[in-house]
Amino acid sequence: MSLSYIKRAEQGNHSALSFVGSIILCFGALLLGSLPLIMAIGFKKILSKTDEPLGNNLEQLMGHFPYPISYALLMSGFVILLGAVWFSIRVIHKRKFGTLWSDQDKFRVKDFLKGLIFSILIFAISDLLMHQFDPGYHTWVFNADKFWAFLPFAIIFVPLQTLAEEALFRGHLYQAIGLATKNKWTALVICSIIFGVFHFGNSEMGINFWKMGLIYIGTGLMIGLTVVFSKGIEFGWAFHLVNNMYLTLIVTFPTSSLNGPTLYTIPQPSADRILLEFFIQFAIFVLALAVLYRKNLKTLLTESA
């Protein structure tokens, strides 16, 4: 009998204790994500023998080194997280890592490419429409020297960072909660809330705490729906990858957590406008999923987990 995506986690060691231990391990790795950057700053202070303050926020921490170096150190924390997820699946649960990719126990290239193409289109169309309605919303700030120096770091680390988050939140955690509750919709909601809460420390929350918080939880819900529709994390990883590449290389704004060298900036970001854009994208996203995965629509209600 074919197993659902959640029930793939029943392979190998699927005791409650093993899931508790592996989830704690993964979230411990996530919380230690900034450790490489902080350790590098500490070594710098020791070698230079200065009393330079460590900093109270991410922007100040990133300011200790040239931006590409600080970025690489910060993102290397997600390599630790990805390693923790791999260790959890292969060593603690003693099952194939493919069970985390999809209900077919393998990485489905077609689903990843679907997500990639769709995501590029939705961001491109959204920006074109915004430019038509408000030509001054984006400001060109391209700095060739800084951009090209940073580009290789983004190309290397954004895929690793987004894969680590997807493997944890939409893969390991979703399967664990799904097995515990016997309901994929409950797992979807809980994982979306946890994903959003773990982003509440980002400086974007300063724009408007409640509205940006709603966007983060909503983004978790939106990406989580790709798992429910597609029965795997490939489509969601592609969307997350394009989203973060877009925010890292194409458009940023002054209060962004990672305000690096991009092509454009939004000088005065509005929480209301960002929220409106998000709701429009959410509606389009769900409709697209329903069309792209129409063959799976019946299982949305017939399969509980």
Image: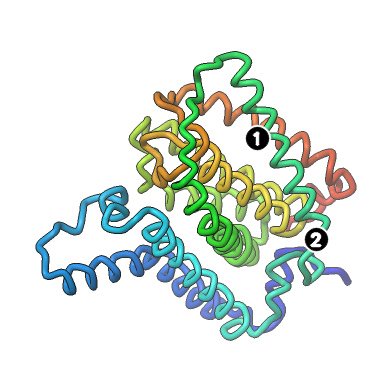
Q: Position of residue 189 (x, y in %)?
A: 58, 48
Q: Quadrant of the C terminus?
A: bottom right
Query: Which amino acid does the dot numbered 1 rest on?
Result: Phe
Q: Residue at x 49, y 46 (%)?
A: 147
Is 175 in front, or is 165?
165
Tag of residue 78: none
Q: Position of residue 127 (x, y in %)?
A: 62, 27
Near mark 2 (Cα within 10 A), the count class, few <14, some 14-19 or many ≥20, is few
Q: Residue furthest front?
A: 145
Separation of marks 2 and 1 at Cα, in angstroms:
21 Å
Q: Quadrant of the N terminus?
A: bottom right
Q: Residue furthest top?
A: 133
Q: Position of residue 3 (x, y in %)?
A: 81, 68
Mark 2 lies on a secondary structure that is helix
Query: Which amino acid does the dot numbered 2 rest on?
Result: Val
Q: Disc 2, disc 1: CB below 8 Å?
A: no
Q: Residue at x 23, y 73 (%)?
A: 43
Mark 1 lies on a secondary structure that is helix
In the picture, measured across the screen, residue 89 lies left or right of residue 157, that is right
Residue 117: name its quadrant.
top right
Is the image coloured rainbow, by chain, by secondary structure, or in one colour? rainbow
Q: Residue at x 37, y 59 (%)?
A: 70
Reading the chain from its start, which is encountered first: label 2 or label 1?
A: 2
- Total residue callouts: 2
In this rendering, the answer to whether 64 lies above or below 10 is above
Is 55 in front, or is 274?
55
Tag of residue 123: 1
In this rendering, the answer to whether 72 lies above or below 87 is above
Q: Residue at x 82, y 68 (%)?
A: 104
Q: Position of residue 96 (x, y in %)?
A: 71, 79
Near mark 1 (Cα within 10 A), the count class, few <14, some 14-19 or many ≥20, is some
- Residue at the spot of label 2: 109
